Image: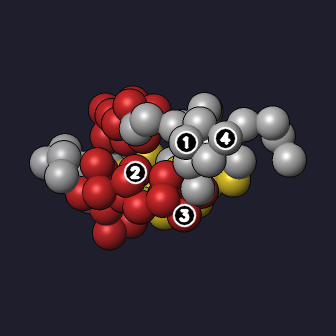
Amino acid sequence: MTGETMGQNMDDGTLTSYVKTKLASDKLVSLTRVGVETNNGVVYLTGEVETGEQKSRSGSLAFEVKGVKQVVNNLQVIKR
């Protein structure tokens, strides 16, 4: 146990869902090529985006989700 109550430490699956929803609602980010995984409140973004702006925006949006402790942005910028 971490000593945190359930209200303080949100379930990783729930965080993943919230991050995916936040990314999907943003017009700049194409969720079809972005993977989201969460482990102990740390969100890992993987996949491909077309611009550096999309990569940065994805990381920022993920970090805005309540309960996210850190974002590891491993998105690759692939010019198409």
Q: Residue at x 81, y 36 (%)?
A: 3
What is the CA distance from the residue labelled 4 to the residue labelled 3? 17 Å
Separation of marks 4 and 1 at Cα, in angstroms: 5 Å
| The C terminus: image quadrant | bottom left
In this picture, residue 57 sits left or right of residue 38:
left
Q: Nearer the N terminus, badge 4 or badge 3? A: 4
Q: Look at 18% across and 52% down and name the residue there.
A: 25
Q: Position of residue 32 (x, y in %)?
A: 32, 69
CA separation in Å, label 1 and label 3: 14 Å
Q: Is residue 75 visible?
A: yes
| Relative height, residue 75 to residue 67 (above, below) | below
Instruction: Give me the disc on residue 19.
Output: 2
Image-based side of 46 in relation to 1, left or right: left
Residue 32's label in the rendered image is none
| Tag in front: 1 or 3 | 1
* Label number found at residue 7: 1
